[in-house]
Image (spheres, helix red, strand yellow):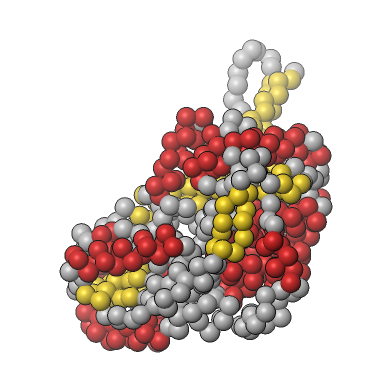
Amino acid sequence: MKIEQPDTIVEDVSAIVTDFLAAPKALIAGRSEPAESGETYPVYNPATGDVLAAVPACGDGDVDRAVKAAQAALEGPWSKMLPVHRQGLLLKLADLIEENGEELAQLETLNQGKSIMLSRLVEVQSSAEYFRYMAGWATKIEGSTLDVSIAIPPGMRYQAYTRKEPVGVVAAITPWNFPLNMASWKIAPALAAGCTVVLKPAEETPLTSIRLAELCLEAGFPEGVVNVVTGMGETAGAALVAHPGVAKIGFTGSTETGKLIGIQAMKDMKRVTLELGGKAPMIMFDDMDLDLLGAAAGIGSFFNTGQTCCAGVRIYAQKGIYEKALEVIANVTRSLAIGSGLDPHNQINPVVSARHQAHVKACIARGLEDGAKPVIGAEAPAEGFFVAPELFTDVRQDMALMQDEVFGPVITMTPFDEPDEAIAMANDSRYGLGASLWTNDLNKVMRYVPKIEAGTVWVNSHNIPDQNMPFGGIKQSGIGREHGRGALDNYLETKSVCVAYR
């Protein structure tokens, strides 16, 4: 069913969703299958803590079958398909995502916990738009002709050119914060480039990825072009990364896991793109438009309950506006309604799992132990995996609360005097994914944007990506870029061809 209104409450879960939850399966070579072992593991509803479904605990054998299915599809009808036909399938898939949008959104909110409005607008609508965007690139893959200066043997002439070819089977490993959207970010450019995919979603949130693969078949993609294996990272994920049939790894997740994947990729010389953690700073100058403070906190900091790699969690406000900014942002934080994502009026929803809830609470406890001052002190619901939003002041740069990724509804505010002081504090991090400047002075924008160590710098906004704008990090926030033409290039190899003639 298409989404009618993104801000309506879900009173009753769709019967289609309920039926799907009864027996979700992995999808290998076009068939829905249990794990070879027959084993399953539970996934949970974060709003209640109850078991939502049991999904296959795939292992080495399942991964091997999925990779071989992707290889067979690559060598079979998929490689013979015209680019315009790949484009057509991607456009059809985008339509199917929209046609099944309400069910996908409900499934996402039940499994991940996020606001149903975010599920409808970001997970569903943005994913459909992403497939449409990448569909356009399928017919625009091109090489170049080269003038060469080869002088031997005498009398021989040469013409050289390059051609772009799909890299091969792609291992796409996605996180739990935006399950459907992140799967789209990986799958769409890979398919546009002519690759085949084995998708391994985060073990906490595999459900919309399974459904997406089913929609790929419904759209007409040949069997084996898109496969999904579910299971633990240390089993299914590790087996997929190490499989010799995989040519390219695209991973979004924690820096710690990304490092392990990078090491394995280098052992096999696999191509790899890593979009990892972040600890984004927001630098607010005295001359900023104070009317933007609400959006800065609501969208920049607490979007998706702070479970966003680019969340603006380190706020540096110049002393001339610090007290006012602190007052406004504290009031915004206090005003955020806490509750189930099925009610779009709730702006703070549960975090994804009991384990992550414990992590966020431990970060808050460490901050208190280190001497940081909490401003809000709210209580979270006892049922489910909730954490109340918190704002800390008196946080030193060397505190864990300032340096480590919390990935939850926890932010800090720190005053500064001079701009260079703020830039130094903003760059005092092992991460470099996103950042923002807030000012009405164009001179400051042009002067300080180059000094910020981040893959994306927003000005007077934060945490707003676009499919045409490259996205990725520096330092320990990753390698490579997603979105735009560069996303397509991640899945293409360049072959040089040199033709001798007389």
**Is residue 324 positioned above or below 235 on the image?**
below
Q: What's the residue at 29%, 67% (across, down)?
A: 364
User: Quadrant where the C terminus lies?
Assistant: top right
Q: Which residue ends up furthest to the top in the rendered image? A: 153
Examine the rendering and report whether any part of residue 325 can be seen: no
Residue 250 horizontal side relative to residue 4, left or right: left
Pick whichever, 143 or 117, lies toward us.
117
Q: Residue furthest left?
A: 371
Which image quadrant for residue 155?
Answer: top right
Residue 302 position in % (x across, y down): 43, 74
Instruction: Please say whether residue 255 is visible from this viewpoint.
Output: yes
Name the residue rendered at 75%, 58% in the picture.
215
Residue at image point 64% right, 71% down: 106
Q: Residue at x 68, y 56 (%)?
A: 24
Foreground residue among 85 and 252: 252
Considering depth in this image, is 275 or 70 the residue closer to the camera? 70
Which of the image's four quarters has the N terminus? bottom right
Residue 38 x, y percent position in the rendering: 65, 44
